[in-house]
Amino acid sequence: MTPVPKVNASTRTQGSTIYYADGKTVLGVMGTSRRIVPLSKMSPNVRNAVLAAEDRKFYHEAAISPTGIARAVVNNLSGGDTQGGSTITQQYVKNAYLNQERTFTRKFKELFVSIKISKSHSKDQILEDYLNTIWFGRGANGIQAAAKIYYNTDADKLTVPQAAVLAANVKWPGHYDPSSTGQRLQDTVARYNWVLQGEVTMGTLPQAEADKYKNHPPKFVKQKSTKTSGQKDYLLERVRQALTSLGVDEAKLETGGLKVYTSWDPKLQAKAAATVQAKLRAHNMPNDTRVGLVTIDAKTGEIKAAYGGKDFTKRAVDDAYFSTAQIGSSFKPFVLAAAIKEGIGLKTTMNAAAPAWINTEGDRVAPHTVGAAPFSNDEGNTDKVVNLIDATAESYNTVYVPLGFKAKWQNVLQVAEDAGLPKTALQRGHPGEGGFFLGQSDMRPLDLAGGYVTLANDGKFITPHSIIRVEDQHGKVIKKPTLERRQVLEAPLVHDVQYAMQAVVKRGTGVRAQLGDHQVAGKTGTTNGNKSAWFSGFTPPTTGSDPVQYVTTVGMWIYHDPITKGKHKRAGSYGLLQHVGDYGHINGGDLPAQIWHDYMSQALEGKTTGSFDPPAYVGENKAYATPSPTMTTPSSTPTPTCRPDQEPAVDDCKPRKTPNPNDTKHCDRVPTPDCPDHSKSPGPGTTCKPWDMTCTSPSTEPGGPGNHGNNAQDVQGRAARPLKD
C-alpha cells in the first residue's frame, strides 16, 4: 500500500508580517508571501469561484476523478499533456505531499494518497488547505497573499468579480490579467466569464448578477509607488537586524509566519524624510550630503522615526543607524552634568577669553607651557568672564575644556557612559585630552539620541529599542526586548543641565530651533573645518492622557562614496560643509537646527507641551574668574561685514559675480557657533551592527559607510589639543 508522505514543508511556510506602531498597519512582509487563513476568513465568493473553476462537484463526489485519471494515462502513454481533470483533492495532494513530476508513477501515487486524505480530512479542511497552498502568480502564495497583491484587500473581503479573476488564474497563474491587451485580454475575459457561468450552474450565483459582471473583469490594483519603498527598506533592514540581535534566526523570520510589532510611526517617518529632502533641495545641497535623523520617545525608549538616506534600494547605507561622525559640542551637556555632579554649580564663573593655553588641571597657563595646549572659540574670541549657563549658550571651548578637567575626565567619561553613549565610541575620543570634552568622539545619530534621552528623561536611562514584541503564527509571544531602566543622574542635577540647554535655543547658538509656544532644550555641535554639524534637542512631555516626549538628533556631513568598478575608481572620502549649497559654511545651528525645527514643528502639530522644571542650582558657585562690570554680551547672530567684491551668503560672505579687480583678498569669515581644527574628519561607521547600541568595532576613515572612527593617529596630538565648538 502507498503510505501518506509528510506534507511538503514549503507549502505551509509563511512569511513574517511586520507592523507599524499601531499594531495594525503592515510595514512589510519578510520571506514568502503566504499567510495561512482559516476557511471562515475566506469570502464565500472565493470558495464558490474556485470550485466553479476547478472542481464543481467537489462536495458531492469522490476525491478522485476516474475519467481524469484515464485521460492522464492516455496522454502520458502518448506523450501528451498530463494536466487536467484532477479534482481539488488531487491538486492539493500533488502540491502538498508529492512533487510536480509529470510521470505515470507520480499520477497513480497521487490517486492513492488522495483517497487516504479524503478519509482523514473533511471537505472543508481539504479546501482550506488547498486555498492556502496554491500559487496565484505575481509572488502570491495562497489566497490571502493573492488578495493583497492583486487587489490590496483581504481574502474575506473579495467581491464576486475579484474572486472570479483570481479563480481563473489557478489554471495559469498570473496569465489572466484584466489590464492586458490583444489575445491575452480575450483569454482573460473568456476564462473570467466561464467562471461566473460556472457559479450560475452550481447555483451559487444568480444569472442576473453574473450578467451584470460579465465581460468586465476588475483590473488589478497598480503596484504602489516606489517613492516610499526605499524608506520602507531602511525600516525593514533595521527590523531584520534588531530581530537577529534578539535571537530570531533568518530561517524563522523567512518561513515562520511571525508577527513582529515595532515602534515605528509611519507619519513621523514620512515627515522626517520629507523634511530632510525638502531642506536639502531648498538650500541646493549636493547629492553627497549625508543626513541621519533619529527620534526616540524619552518616556518609553521607543525609536519612533529614523531617516538614514533617500532610497535604500539605491544606496544601502543607513546614515542614522550605521554611519558615524564626530559629535562636536553636542557632547558638552554631558561635561556639564559631570561638573555639576562634582559640585560645580551653574553660576560658577570662568574666563572665556581666547586664545587660552590650558593645562590638564583646567588652569590657564603661559603660552607653550609643557602639558598645555591652546584653545579658541569658533564664535569669536571674547574677553568675557561668564557663568556656565552663558558658556553653554555660546558654546565657549575656553570654558568647557577647563571645566572638563576640573570635573575630572574620568567622571565625564562615566557620566556619558551611564547616560547611554557607547563606551567604545567614547574611548575613541581619547579621554584625558582637552578635545575629548569638545566632542571628538564619533558616534551614530542613534547613539547620540540615546544619550540625550537620559537628559530629557530627568536622568533616567532607558534602552532605545524598535521591537515591541514578536509573536508566533498562533499569537504566542516568543520574544520581547530586555529593557534596562535606571536612574543614572539625579533629577535636580539634570534640571540644571536642561536649563543651560534651554539658553542655547533661547539666545545662543541654537536659536533657529525655537518652536514658538514649545519650550526647547538642545545643543549644537560642529567639528573642526565644518566636517560635520549636529543639532539635538527635546521639548517637555506633551500634555494629556498619553504623553510623549520626542528627543530628536540631526547629524549632517558630506561623504563621497567609493567607486570600485570602471576606469574612475576611487576610495570613499569626506568633504567639508564649507561653500556648499547656499552656505559659506554649515554649523550645527544652521541647517541641522533648521531641519530639526521644521520636522519637530510637524511632529508636535496639534499637541501641547508642558514646561521644564526650574533649575535647582545644585553645587557650589565657584569663582574661577571674576567678571568685569563693564563687559557686555555680544550678539549671538553676528552679521557678516563683506568687502566690496563680496556679497552676503546665508551665514558668510561669498564672491560677487563680478569681482572688484582692486581687491583680491578672500572674505574674512564671520565667527559662528561651533568647533577649530583638531581632527581629520567626522565619519560614518564600522563593521558594527546597526542595531547594536554598544558598537565596538574599530575604525579607519570617518565620514563614510562602514568605518566607525577617528583614525586616532591622525586625529590629534596628545594633551589638551583643541576642537572647536
Image (cartoon, helix red, strand yellow):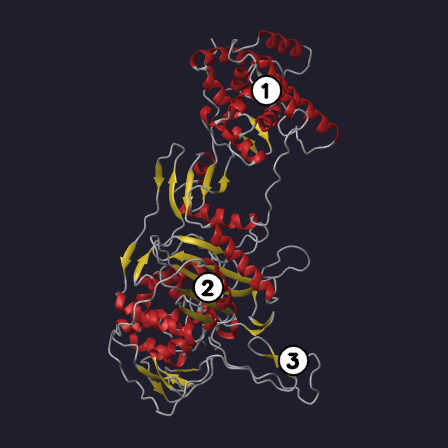
Indicate the quadrant containing the C terminus: top left, top right, bottom left or bottom right: bottom left
Of residue 97 and residue 476, the one placed in the foreground of this image is 476
| Depicted 428 relative to depicted 28: above or below | below
Q: Position of residue 718 (x, y in %)?
A: 40, 76
Which residue type does callout 2 highlight? Gly
Q: Which residue is pictured at 46% across the width and 49% down the height?
A: 238
Query: What is the secondary structure assignment of the residue under circle 3?
Result: strand
Of residue 148 and residue 237, the one placed in the foreground of this image is 148
- Residue, disc 3: 655
Residue that protrudes farthest toward the right in the picture? 182
- Residue, disc 1: 101
Query: What is the secondary structure assignment of the residue under circle 1?
Result: loop
> Which is closer to the viewer, label 3 or label 1?
3
Q: Where is residue 133 in the image (x, y as percent from the top left)?
A: 51, 25
Of residue 346 and residue 502, the one placed in the foreground of this image is 502
- Residue, disc 2: 709
